[in-house]
Amino acid sequence: MSDLDGPGFQACRLHEPIVDFYQHTAGWRLELWSRWSSTRRSGGCGQHGPAAARSTSELAHLEQVIAVERERASARIEALTRQFDAIVESSAIAPPDDEHDPEGSTVAFERAQVATLVTSARSRLAELEQAQQRLVGGWYGSCERCGQRIPVDRLLARPMARMCVACAATDRLRRA
Ligand SMILES: [Zn+2]
């Protein structure tokens, strides 16, 4: 346990059940520990968790980022849906003659393009909602593959990230 000691963290200062908990769960995701340790910290012990722990303020900030991104995604879906409806409506008023009117294929193309954008905006929103759920559940921000903590910069840039950069790259290669 003492190898965990570092600035602001001494294993010996933990109560016995906590040491016990940690020793039995050392293989678990760090995130669980960090969340659990942050609730413990609010008990006023004044000690900070291991360096790997995500601070409560960092989590609060990430939660805010996710909320903002969710709102953005919702607004985008709404705008794109309106755009899609407008295209459908305009082509209904003046149905394009696909065979003789080159405009017809343009409208179809435009409609397909907007439909694709709506789909991707919806999946982004779904991913953000899952991120929100992980955050509430206390396992947000750990790499799904290697269990390492995903750096905060990556989470700020991509709040729905489920893997660290290295694992995400491996995953992409595997899928390619
Ligand atoms: Zn990883």
Image: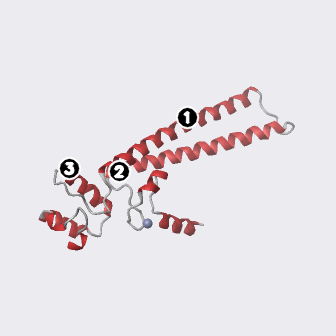
Residue under circle 3? 42
Q: Position of residue 174 (x, y in %)?
A: 55, 69
Give how far apart the Cα atoms at labels 1 and 2 are. Answer: 30 Å
| Cα distance between the residues tagged 3 and 1 | 41 Å
Q: Is residue 10 left or right of residue 72?
A: left
Q: Please, which residue is most extreme toward the front here?
A: 7
Q: Residues within 10 Å of mark 2 (few under 14, many from 20)?
A: few
Residue 58: give its label.
2
Question: Residue flagged by tag 2: what amino acid is it?
Answer: Glu
Q: Is residue 71 left or right of 88 when viewed as pictured?
A: left
Which of labels 3 and 1 is toward the front? 3
Image quadrant of ligand 1 equals: bottom left
Residue 23 seen in the current view: yes
Q: Residue at x 41, y 56 (%)?
A: 152
Q: How many marks?
A: 3
The percent position of residue 141, horizontal first and vertical second, equals: 39, 57
Does residue 78 appear left or right of residue 151 in this picture?
right
Task: Check if mark 3's residue and mark 1's residue have beta carbons within 8 Å.
Answer: no
